[in-house]
Amino acid sequence: QQPVQSPQAVILREGEDAVINCSSSKALYSVHWYRQKHGEAPVFLMILLKGGEQKGHEKISASFNEKKQQSSLYLTASQLSYSGTYFCGTFNFGNEKLTFGTGTRLTIIP
Amino acid sequence: DTGVSQDPRHKITKRGQNVTFRCDPISEHNRLYWYRQTLGQGPEFLTYFQNEAQLEKSRLLSDRFSAERPKGSFSTLEIQRTEQGDSAMYLCASSLVTGQETQYFGPGTRLLVL
């Protein structure tokens, strides 16, 4: 079953912060975050493994709540280059393939 | 290491024709995945290989679709008797089985069936 992301779309001014949520109905082994720009392939951002760890680099970070089967992606001081559609991908126990979420379209305006 | 490559990048074909796409994974990666993506949707899993063995196929993969990965290197995805509903972006990804399974995507092949 496909993970559900929220919000579906968000518009920010440059410099503002955003949070994108990913929720699964199944127990998760790991969560992967990707950003895809129009007409291009998804680009890997980060992976989070079970254990509630938070990972990130620069102004993009993420958390993983294994018990709640949820992950959140945090974008701080957004830049124009952050525009695109963000997908979470989940690995479930016993299932060796990524299931991608419904997507969140992020638009950054100057 | 030049990343995952796919060929062709674009393909326009007439309904009923056969098409074949190629994917070259990152050289040391032993897993290779095929996905299909339609406008506004996330990638949908089609099939994957570990080395040359095809380990799983999605129900989305009808009998008209076949994938191979001879010698565990590049892979091909063939669609026979194409239908308009096959129009989509076909993405290939590869990964190294390490327990973290980060998948790196190629640029995709955009198929348009007329």
Image (cartoon, coloured by chain):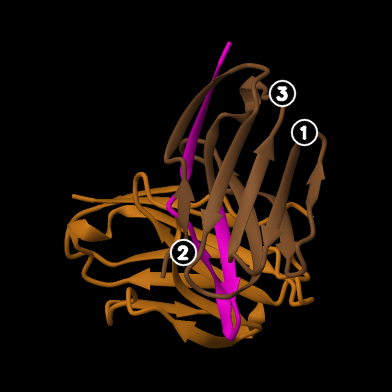
> How far is disc 2 from disc 3 in space, using C-alphas?
33 Å
State the hue of chain A. Answer: brown
User: In percent of the image, x 45 and y 77: which residue is there?
Assistant: B67
Is A102 situated above or below A109? Answer: below
State the hue of chain B. Answer: orange
| Image quadrant where one finds the N terminus of chain B | bottom right
Chain letter of disc 1?
A: A
Indicate the amino acid at tag 1: Lys
> How far is disc 3 from disc 1 in space, using C-alphas?
7 Å
User: In percent of the image, x 73 and y 70: which residue is there?
Assistant: A50
Locate residue A22, reporting x and y percent: 54, 54
Q: Residues within 10 Å of mark 1 (few under 14, many from 20)?
A: few
Number of the front mark, 2 or 1: 1
Type of secondary structure dominating the magenta stretch: strand
Locate residue B99, reporting x and y percent: 76, 76
Indicate the amino acid at tag 3: Ala
Residue farthest toward the right in the current orientation of the protein: A58
Residue farthest toward the top in the current orientation of the protein: A110
Locate residue A81, reporting x and y percent: 64, 26
Secondary structure beneath label 3 = loop
Q: Which residues are magenta?
A: A88-110
Q: Residues within 10 Å of mark 3 (few under 14, many from 20)?
A: few
Residue linked to disc 3: A77
**Circles 3 and 1 in contact, beta carbons < 8 Å:** yes
Number of the front mark, 2 or 3: 3
